[in-house]
Structures are given as C-alpha cells and as structure tokens.
Image (cartoon, grey):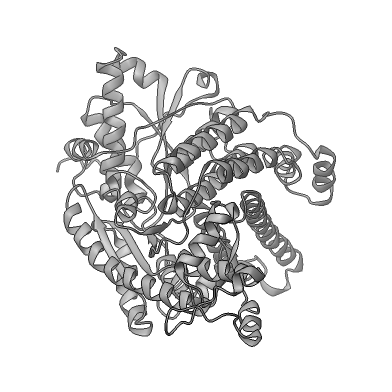
Amino acid sequence: MPHIRHFRRPVERDVTRPERDNVTFLWGGLTARHEALITAAMQGLGYRVQLLPTPTKADFQTGREYGNNGMCNPAHFTVGALINFLKSLRDVEGLSTEEIIRNYAYYTAGSMGPCRFGMYESEYRLALRNSGFDGFRVLLFQQKGGMKQSGMESAVDLNAQFGTALLNGVIMGDILNELAYRIRPYEVDPGQTDRVFADITARLSDRLRAKSASVFKGRALARVIAYLLPGPDLETLEPIVDQVVDHYYVETLRECVTTLNREIEVDFLRVKPVVKVTGEFWAQTTEGDGNFRLFSFLESQGAEVLVEPLTSWANYLCDLALSRLAERRGPSLQAVPGGYWNLAGRTKAAVAHWRRWLIIRLGQAVLNREYERIRRTLGGAAHLQVSQAEMRRMARPFYDPRLTGGEGHLEVSKTIYCTLNRWAHMILSVKPFGCLPSTQSDGAQAAVLARFPEINFLSVETSGEGELNAYSRIQMALTEAKTASRNEFAASLEKTGYALDNIRAYCAEHREFRRPIQPFPQYEGVCGKAANFVRYVASRMDRAPARRARKRDCSTDTCTGLVSAGVRRARQSQKGTWSA
C-alpha cells in the first residue's frame, strides 16, 4: 500500500527584528490616496515600505499563468502585480533572485472566512514558486489575529502605536477620497481637483511621516487609566491617549480646507445622478482594471460617485465581534466547572466577558470619534458613519446578520439605507466573478427589490475581460438615474419660484457659492446635489430684498414680484441634515 502524504500548511519564515532595517515591505490594493497616506504613516514608524503599482490586465494574465485558475480575479490581479514587480527588480534593476527574496516581503490581509479569500496566502506562494521566486515571504495580517499576533521577534509590531498610525492613514484617506469624488464632477477647471488633492495628499503624508514615534501627549492620563483599568498596559494606552488628546493634524487639515476653497471653483448647478458603489471589498475599492475602472467610467457618463469608506468596514468588524461576544456569554457561563454554584468561576467568566466587551467598545468609540473629528475639520462635507445597529435592523428581514463572508449583510442594508435616506439615485454592486458571499447578497436583493420597487439596483461581476458588457448594462441603469435626477431638479427649481438664470447670476456674484467645501441642507426627499443646492441658494436669495422682485411665475416664467409671506415662512422652516 503506497504511503499517503497529507497536505501540511507550510510554515512561513517571518521577517525578524534584526532584518527590519534591510527588508522592504511591499503592499497595495487600495485607492491611491489610501496607499500614499498609509505608506507615510508606516514610514513614520521606521518601516521600509514600497507600494506595488495598480494592477492591470497584464498583471491579471500573469496571475492566471502562474496561479490557480480557480481563484477569483482579486487574487489573479494582486499576485500578478507582485510577480511582475519582482521580475522588474530582477530583469530591469539587476537584482538577483536571492537578493529579492532576502530583502523584500509582501504584506497582505488574511481571513478565516468561508470564501476563497481565506486561501489567498497559499495561492500567492504557489504562484511565486511557479514564477521562480520560491521562498519569497508572504506575511499575513489576520482580521482576527489581535494586536500582537506577529510575536516578540517579528519585525512588524502590530501594537497600539501601529494601530493608531494605520487609523490616521485610513480615516484621512476615506474622507479625502469621498471629497475628491464629490467635487470632481462639478469642477469648473477640468483636472484642477486632481492636482489640488495630489498636493494635499503629499502635505498630509509629510505630516504623517514626521509624527514622532516616541513623543506622546497625555502620559499622566494614560498612567491613571492603566491604574484604574486593569488589563491594558501603559505601552498600549499611551498611543491611544495621545491619539485622543493631541491636535497634531488639526492645523494641517484646516489649511487643506482653505486650499480647496481657494484653488477649486465648482458649479453645483450641474444636474448629475448620484451612484453608490458597494459590493466585494477589493472590487469596490481598487481604481484600476480590477473593477473595469468603473469610477472614472461613471464620471465620464455624467454621474457623481459615492464611494465606501474603509472605516465602515472596521465598524462592521467591531459590531460583528460584539454580536458574537453577546451570543457566547450564556454558553461560556454554563461551561464553568461546578455549574451554577461555582460563584467564583462564574464571576471570573463574567469579568472576562465584560472586559472584552469594554475593549471592543472603547476601540470602536476611538475609531468613530477620530473619524468625526477629522471629518469636521475637513469642512464636514463627507458623510457621517451610519449606525451598525441600524444597518443590522434594515438587513435582518432579508439577510441574517450572523452570516459572514464578504461584507455580510452590509450589501443589503446599504442598498436599503442609501435609497430610503436619499443618498443615491442608483446602487451599483461590484463583485468578482464567482464571489460566493456577494452571490448570496444578490439572491437576497431580489426580495429587497420586491419590497422596495423604487430602488434602482444593478449588480456587475468583474473579471479580466468583459468590460464592454458591464459598461452597456451600467449605461442602461444610468439612464433611469439621470431621468430621476433631472425630474428631482425640476421639482426643486419649481419650488424656489426663481428662474435658473437668476440663480446662476446670484452664484456668479457671490464667491462662497462656488467653493467646493460649503455645507448646505439635504432637504427631505431630495437626493441630488444640484436639487438641494438650488433650494439652498433660493433661501439665501429670499433674504436679499433686491432679489425678491425677480421672482418668476412658475406657470408662465414671467416675473411676478414678491412671494407671499406664508410661502417664505414655509420654505425657511425646511429642515434637513447638513451635507455638501
């Protein structure tokens, strides 16, 4: 009988502490702004970090050539980009394979979820071995691994200081990314938004890189908390307290708002449908061929893109951890040796449960507090973080929140929330071909659309080819969204009682209406920026006596003098949430 050799997971050789100054960590896969800011934050901690180029179709073909053809396209694009980069180091820069393996390592996210994402690490190693880079190190950041999973001898310390640096890069990237996508469709000078945001990103990157890794504010407060709250040590508390009490980035962020308002001029009277992009994490985030360059395509078709912040994903993971902790509380108490009468054991288990609950809650509170502080400092134009409890409540009739994998119930709840709260005219769900968790969500979306027929929803699968078919389907769905946005604008303009030319003339006379960062209310039942903006400008015009004589008759488009006091009071009493 032949000897059966069972598969054993290979033991990865980690990058050790003595190698830290010589090893360059490669990574990528997010938006350009996220990558620049997170790289700067890691460099500020003393790591040698280099970004991989945005994956292209050539990288996809390389990934297919050397990797497992059964993997979904994020793996093919990512590992293909890595292999082609390593080949360029060998063939163009003249480094030997041994030097590359010794002086470079790839850092990526990992998962214990049900989809193929949990096997990416092994697939990367297979492709690297097939391409001639056997032994190249692939380091994994597990979503469930905790802060210190890398060990004491690892070159990468996943501690609180690492976490706060990453937090700043992610949140700043989230907000800058949303602002850029919300401003660019309305810019008067084409290309100016990209130029200004490139300068702002470089300025904030320098600030992140210059952040001292050893000077913390609030050391005394950290010592008090460490004394009153057993568990977290002083080394963990100091960076967290410094993050909360320090205003290191505030002045630079305020300067960025001044720069945006000074150098960019916008025309918010352009009528554009808002398209919310959801779906699988990588596909809805990358800006290259991996998702058919959908963001730039949507803008070229006259749409405003509402992108998803990475902070929402972090909030989802925290909420998921809290839900599972609550479900395990009863069984963990019942499993105490001695049963109900073991009061000491039950007390110890209860204390451990509430300690874990408190740590997750505090982490989530710091995350949202910092997001809100940076959001407000950057003008308050980005959207607020949505309550995860509200997202669970909306999704529960259609998708069990306990089902994980991909974005879990978020794809369903975002579709409902963004439509009912008038955040978007269209929901575009993007996912790799054959992605199991997203396919489950698409099945649930059929019930959602039956319950809410007003939702304009489209699901698009991406791969290395097929973009023309995807573009055609998106254009058909966009036609409906454009019609809805034009009707909405016409209704808002009619409510104002002003001619559009009069509103344009008023905006031309007042520079503040042409600034990209300006808060104005989102009126009830109104989604589009132009529809909200025209009503806001009209409310300001009502306060100018010289403008009241220009009111037009909505039925004849002729001037009719002053609007009645009752109509003015009704208009001025409109309430809404502030947005840009």
For the point 51% across and 60% down, which residue is it? 505
Asked whether 568 or 176 is in front, the reply is 568
Residue 395 spot, x, y in % from top left: 45, 75
Quarter holding the N terminus? top left
Count of marks overlaid on the render: 0
For the point 71% across and 28% down, which residue is it? 214
Picture quarter containing residue 350? bottom right
Quarter holding the C terminus? bottom right
**231 horizontally vs 441: left or right:** right
Residue 3 spot, x, y in % from top left: 20, 40
Judge whether 41 appears above or below 542 on screen: above
Picture quarter containing residue 53? top left
Residue 399 visible in the shown view: no
Residue 511 spot, x, y in % from top left: 58, 52
**104 horizontally vs 312: left or right:** left
Residue 419 visible in the shown view: yes
Picture quarter containing residue 482? bottom left
Asked whether 104 or 336 is in front, the reply is 104
The outermost residue toward the left is: 1
Judge whether 313 appears above or below 50 on screen: below
For the point 47% across and 46% down, which residue is it? 142
Residue 367 spot, x, y in % from top left: 62, 52
**551 horizontally vs 464: left or right:** right
**490 horizontally vs 211: left or right:** left
